[in-house]
Image: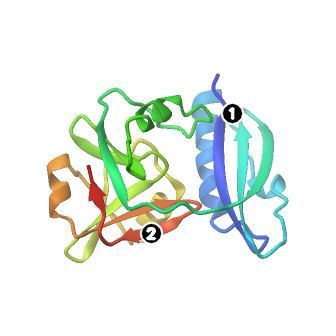
Amino acid sequence: MNKLLETIKIVNGMAPFLAFHNERLNHARQILFNAHDQIDLNSFIIAPSQSEIYKCRVIYSKTIEMVEYSHYKPRHFKTFKVIEDDNIVYDFKYLNRENLNRLLRFKGQADDILIIKKGLVTDTSITNVAFLSEDKWLTPSTPLLKGTTRERFLKEKKIVEARIILEDLNNFSKMAIMNALLGFIVIENFKLG
């Protein structure tokens, strides 16, 4: 069976929002591996205490298999190549990202891709997305992966789910990308190609 991955941001020796990672990890273990015990990632993460930002990668299946740390260097995004794929599935955060990497090969000069599945907006290759409509941030109700930051922002009512089709994208003034490492990044003048 495929291995899975949690990517966790470590700031000043702390892993904020770890409860959302625990929830996703244990849900995936239960569905994919029939594991009913609960793992608390606090028991496995020994965060570097430096003031820098680190990326922690937890590789797991039924049990935790590896925890690794690296310095985090944020990427910058402004341009997105729209890619349509009606068959892509990435409902769990698999270590094997070949389905996504295959689509990335078509991004050309864009910073990332925006994936459309069956006419509906989903995600970029590494983030969930949201779009500003009047005074509300809308996130697609059809994400490929329910990211931890997306789930947290939904719970805090900072974003709301909506059915977003490809044609809707021209109506939005701003786009935001979100994941555990980036947080919620607003892109003022996003470009789609």
Name the foreground residue: 53 vs 15. 53
Between 58 and 152, which is closer to the camera in this rendering?
58
Structural crowding at the residue carrying mark 1, measured as other residues with C-alpha within 10 Å and reported as few (<14), some (14–19) or many (≥20): some
The reply to whether residue 37 is visible in this rendering is no
Colouring scheme, one of rainbow, by chain, secondary structure, one colour: rainbow
Q: Position of residue 57 (x, y in %)?
A: 71, 49
Farthest residue toward the front? 109
Q: Residue at x 59, y 58 (%)?
A: 20
The answer, for residue 171, to whether it is visible in the render is yes
In the depicted structure, whether residue 170 falls above or below residue 193: below
Residue under the image location 16 percent in, 59 percent down: 170
Can you identify the residue that label 2 sits on? 185
Could you tell me residue 116's position as x and y percent? 29, 41
2 vs 1, front mark: 2
Q: Quadrant of residue 82?
A: top left
Say whether disc 2 or disc 1 marks the residue closer to the N-terminus: 1
Which kind of residue does numbered mark 2 sit on? Ile
In the depicted structure, whether residue 109 falls above or below residue 129:
above
> Closest to the observer: 33 or 64?
64
- Give percent across and percent down for residue 66: 80, 41
Q: Residue at x 26, y 72 (%)?
A: 136
Number of the label disc, if any, that sits on residue 100: none
